[in-house]
Image: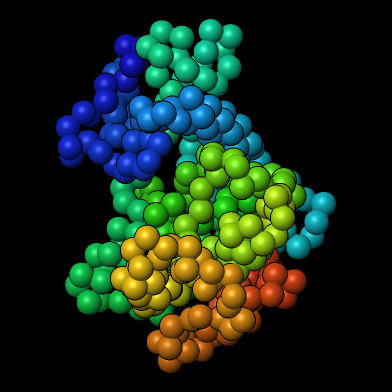
Amino acid sequence: MKGKYQMDMSQNGILGEGTSCICRRGRLLETGELVAIKIYKPSESSFSANNHQACLKKHKRSIAVLQTLQEPFARPTDPKHWNSLLDHVKPSKLFMQLWDYSKDASGEPGWDSIDDELYVVTELAQYSLKDYISKRRRKSSPPSKETVRTIAKAIVLAMAGLHSKGFVHLDMKPENLMIFDGQLKLIDVDGCLEIGTLISLSDSSISFSPCYCAPEFASFVLGREGADFPALPGLDSWSVGCTLCELVSLQPLLIDECKTFYQEDQRSGQVNFIDSVARMETAPVPRALEPFDSNLSQMVTGWLVVCSPSERRTCAEALDAPYFTWGDD
């Protein structure tokens, strides 16, 4: 790649793969420094033209967001999206760092003018929060209360930081939180939108995960909220709450319900499951949460996994919950 990077093309070199991209381990030839290289891969289907544009749109958005995330924090106009803890943290501690990216002939983010690839080069993580949870589940070894509290605070702080910069992630889940030399950071920002942006059902560059999506977003996906829907931080707050539950239960919050719908009807299982999420009226938290940590349970059910969007708190507000402040001087 431009004679600058060597990419590991072996099976072991794959760090992650989705429908539109693959991430591989790479190396900066000049210094030997290890990096992660994300390559977009438009499909060869009859819809390849649309997919090609969706990949380009994600790429441009990813670069714009990552560049903004690397700038120093500044207090937003809406105080609900700021917490004083952000006064003492650098963005590089919360967000994956951008090293390089493909550029078109005019120097803008796009298909590389030499090798015709669409790629992003970032710092290399060791493992994801999903990997951590999976390992704990295989060993039947849930993390301690203290460990969960530490990880939970890192997650909520990262999301509060994202919102303070004016973005909504829309696909927050353990897979999109990674550990870089012991520091938890947010990744996969190519689906991020500015707060208040209207989301269109026809926009194929937007991703979401049914087990982590809020009821109002599930309703939108089913076409019940009109053609456009505003990207608001509360959507991420719900997903954060689901992720915190997963740290305790060691499985996605609604995975059993999801499997049931798929088993009942393979063809319409996903739609039926999303419909069940859209109709939720009470927080679907695991029973193990309250006996594990009552303060965590109170924050999740009273602040984050709250079915009414108007009653859900922001991540910045959640950092002031008793769960995080208890015992502080």
Q: Specify whether 234 is left or right of 146.
A: right
* Residue at the outermost right position: 77
> Picture coordinates of residue 251 (x, y %)?
35, 71
In this rendering, is residue 318 above or below 229?
below
Q: Residue at x 79, y 60 (%)?
A: 79
Picture coordinates of residue 174 (x, y %)? 41, 59
Of 181 and 268, nearer the camera is: 268
Q: Nearer the viewer, residue 45 or 98?
A: 45
The answer to whether residue 26 is left or right of residue 202 is left
The colour scheme used to paint the residues is rainbow
Q: Quadrant of residue 264?
A: bottom left
Residue beneath the point at 51% across and 53% down: 208
Q: Could one spot residue 275 in this view of the protein?
A: yes
Front in this rendered view, residue 47 or 252: 47
> In the displayed structure, would residue 181 be above or below residue 250?
above
Indicate the position of residue 124 as horizontal and vertical percent values. 35, 39
When the figure is inspected, residue 242 is found, relative to residue 16, above or below; the finding is below
